[in-house]
Image (cartoon, rainbow, N blue to C red):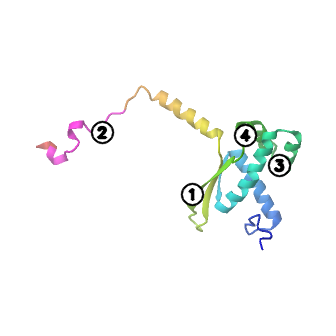
Amino acid sequence: MRHGDKVKKLGRTAQHRRALMRNLVTALFEHERIKTTLAKAKESRRTADRMVALAQKNTVAARREVGRFVSDKTVLKKLFDVIGPRLAGRPGGFTRVLRLGPREGDGAEMALLELVVREERHHEKKAKEAAAKQKGGKKAKPDKKVGEKGKTGDESEK
């Protein structure tokens, strides 16, 4: 029978698991990307997607319901004012889990849990464009000349 297998228990009591999920989801909305174990990432993704769906509604009832789970008021404000509108056109799938491989110490499978559309990526893109504009006047010199491509050091001296 499949009783009680809807939720991954993660080797914790119900209270500990609830606190863990609250902290992971709050950290995800605060930083927009977190590194954790694969099992925790998959389980917290369910909760995070529900919270973003409520943030898209942007009603007082939705804010209160999310506020019961996300206790940090600045993160709650960011979720409803920034993240919710940014993901407004999506019908679901607001987060992604990227596998990172085993952890060095105990071999646990690690993963990156991130929002699908992150604001940081936009800032990183602008920073790269600004850096490219600053370096635009300087061109890199080629390492080898076209004629010397196939020659070794001994052949070029002859």
Which residue, given by chain and number where applicable, does mark 4 sit on? 83
Residue type at mark 4?
Answer: Ile
Residue sitting farthest toward the left: 158
Residue appearing at x 60%, y 63% in the figure: 109
Q: Secondary structure at mark 2?
A: loop
Rendering coords of residue 101 (x, y %): 56, 61
Q: Secondary structure at mark 4?
A: helix
Residue 78 is one of the magenta-drawn residues: no
Mark 3 or mark 2, which is nearer the start of the sequence?
3
Of marks 3 and 4, the one in the foreground:
4
Query: Few, some or many C-alpha atoms within 10 Å of disc 3 (few <14, some 14-19, many ≥20)?
Result: few
Which residue, given by chain and number where applicable, does mark 2 sit on? 143
Residues marked 1 and 2 touching at CB (< 8 Å): no
Mark 1 or mark 3, which is nearer the start of the sequence?
3
Query: Few, some or many C-alpha atoms within 10 Å of disc 4 (few <14, some 14-19, many ≥20)?
Result: many
The magenta-colored residue range is: 140-155
Mark 4 or mark 3, which is nearer the start of the sequence?
3
Residue sitting farthest toward the bottom: 1
Q: Is residue 56 left or right of residue 111?
A: right
Position of residue 133 relative to residue 94, above or below, is above
Rendering coords of residue 103 (x, y %): 58, 63
Which residue, given by chain and number where applicable, does mark 1 sit on? 100
Which residue, given by chain and number where applicable, does mark 3 sit on? 71
Q: Secondary structure at mark 1?
A: strand
Rendering coords of residue 89 (x, y %): 71, 38
Mark 3 to mark 1: distance in Å?
A: 29 Å
Position of residue 124 relative to residue 45, above or below, is above
Q: Secondary structure at mark 3?
A: loop
Mark 2 or mark 4, which is nearer the start of the sequence?
4
Mark 4 to mark 2: distance in Å?
A: 46 Å
